[in-house]
Image (tube, grey):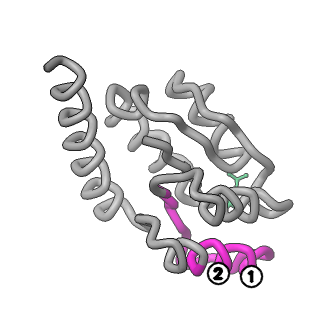
Amino acid sequence: MRIALIAHDEKKAEMIEFAKTHKDLLAQCELTGTGTTGKLIKQHVGLNVQALLSGPIGGDQQIGSLVATQNLDMIIFMRDPLTAQAHEPDIAALLRVCDVHNVPLATNRKSAEILMAYVKLCLEEQNDSSNS
Ligand SMILES: O=C(CO)COP(=O)(O)O
């Protein structure tokens, strides 16, 4: 399972806490993320995350490109809905490309939890079929 992790500044602490909670599952996935989010998760959680560019300088667009080329299975994006972002057009483009390609996208903690339940199921199925 290839997952991108993204968090706006006001949501970074929540993302780190989320990644700690789901560390065992996330460790079985191929993780990528925007620059600062990716680095913080590596540093504070110890997960192996491929950190792309920071969001405001093109990171969201890089993630969008992975979606468009079918190289990503889902995105967990802890978005800050209360702060204006300089790169709002990039964020809108990322959300749009997920809809274009039908890629699951969680933009808040509860949706992220639901996606992790799905990840757990998929990994269990994968492990069952490789054991039989
Ligand atoms: O701005 C972001 C997403 O729009 C996140 O970028 P960083 O992870 O580099 O802070």
The answer to which image quadrant residue 100 occupies is bottom right
20 left or right of 71 in image: left
Direction from residue 24 to residue 40 in the image, left or right? right
Q: Nearer the viewer, residue 12 or 67?
A: 67
Q: Is residue 86 above or below residue 13?
A: below
Q: Which residue is mark 1?
A: 89
For label 2, the SS is helix
Type of amino acid under label 1: Pro
Q: Give the magenta-colored segment's residue range.
A: 75-96
Locate residue 120, reporting x and y percent: 24, 40
Query: Farthest residue toward the right?
Result: 57
Residue 63: x and y, percent?
67, 57
Q: Which of the labelled discs sits on residue 61, or is there none?
A: none
> Quarter of the picture for ligand 1?
bottom right
Asked whether mark 2 and ligand 1 are closer than 8 Å, the reply comes as no
Q: How many marks?
A: 2
Q: Is residue 113 above or below residue 128?
A: below
Give how far apart the Cα atoms at labels 1 and 2 are.
Answer: 5 Å
Residue at the location (64% across, 66% down)? 68
In the displayed structure, 51 sits above or below 8; it is above
What crowding class fits label 2: few (fewer than 14 Cα within 10 Å), some (14-19), or many (20 or more)?
Answer: few
Q: Position of residue 6 (x, y in %)?
A: 58, 54
Residue underneath mark 2: 92
Amino acid type, residue under disc 2 in the picture? Ala
x, y percentage for residue 62? 74, 57
* Front-most of residues 90 and 102: 102
